[in-house]
Image: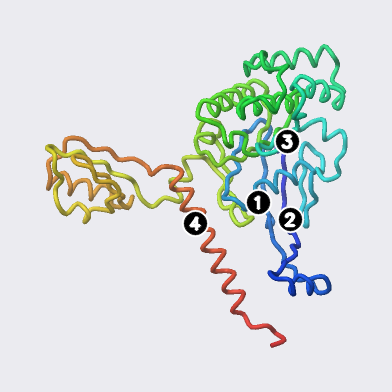
Amino acid sequence: MAIIEIEGLAKSYRIYQKQEGLLASVRGLFHRTYRDVQAVRGIDLAVESGEFVAFLGPNGAGKTTTLKLLSGVINPTHGTARVMGHVPWRRENAYRRRFALVMGQKNQLWWDLPAQESFRLHQQIYAIPPDQFLRRRDELVDLLTVRHLLSQPVRELSMGERMKMELIAALLHSPEVLFLDEPTIGLDVVAQHNIQSFLRHYQQTSKMTVLFTSHYMKDVAALCRRVVIIAQGQIMYDGSLGGIIDRFSGHKMITLVFPGDSLPQGLSRFGEVVEEQAPKVKLRVDRNVIAESLAAILAQHTVQDVSVEDPPLEEVIAEMFSLANEQARSAQAGLEEVPSPHA
């Protein structure tokens, strides 16, 4: 059963175009120029109860806007959405008590107070019974190993420690749905790993539904089986992580290790040479001719070791984003070439 249902959801903004210069600024007081920006362009999406879904896309793709719509922070321009049977932008208290939103670049904790004081405030906001609050707080504090930091002002915590406290605050009322926006942004490798481990364990034990955004593919690989990719406000892909490479990558990587300290000549005829450091060379080869190319290389050269791998996930997704941007520019150019009916 779908716990999140989205149909034709769209959000556009009207933005004032301020011109440079004093005269233009004065003119703008009387005659303003605006342009419409479509942050989300009619997306359809269904998320089942208990899923952990990655919501990926380049900057400005509409990821955060979608999470804000589903959280009821902003209203849509068109379309509908229901989360646990609620329309988010009605902002019903019954809905607010059942979800949580954590944004990696926003703080919900009081900056100058210890985190435990903010936790107490959340207890009052969500009317959590005292025994339940203490049990939940202690469970989360122990899972994230931050008990020794509870009395320390939030401003004195590291970024990783602050994010742990943000997660605790968000989970105190046992939400059924969690929206995470860049939870590991700016964190070091150790802090990222700790957050990943906690989220994976907590989601598996609580069966909570999670929709999260991240620019770190290691987050995605560690946490999610399903990936939704959005670009230019529209969904480009919805499926498994491995399916991204199968669908959008037209090549594989062949790594060859030759005997001696030199490389044979003419390897570029088998594929694009990506990396060359004797005695190793890496080739990018069209996946449709992998078998033929590899057979030809082995027939013509002595090879000590060989491996065939899919390209890095980051590379494939970057290619997808680049393709989406090119398509958007082409579409915009086509619109600009269409003559005005009043011309």
Alpha-carbon span between mark 3 and mark 4: 29 Å
Which of the two labelled residues, at mark 4 and mark 2, occupies the earlier sequence position?
2
Which of the two labelled residues, at mark 1 and mark 3, occupies the earlier sequence position?
1
Helix, strand, or loop for circle 1?
Answer: loop
According to the image, label 4 marks what residue?
Answer: 322
Which amino acid, mark 2? Lys
Alpha-carbon span between mark 1 and mark 3: 16 Å
Q: For residue 130, what is the image quadrant?
A: top right
According to the image, label 1 marks what residue?
Answer: 62
Mark 2: give few (<14), some (14-19) or many (20+) Cα within 10 Å. many
In this view, the residue in front, 25 or 332, is: 25
**Residue at image x 17%, y 49%?**
296
Mark 1: give few (<14), some (14-19) or many (20+) Cα within 10 Å. many
Question: Which quarter of the rendered picture does the N terminus lie within?
Answer: top right
In this view, the residue in front, 311 or 47, is: 311
Helix, strand, or loop for circle 4?
Answer: helix
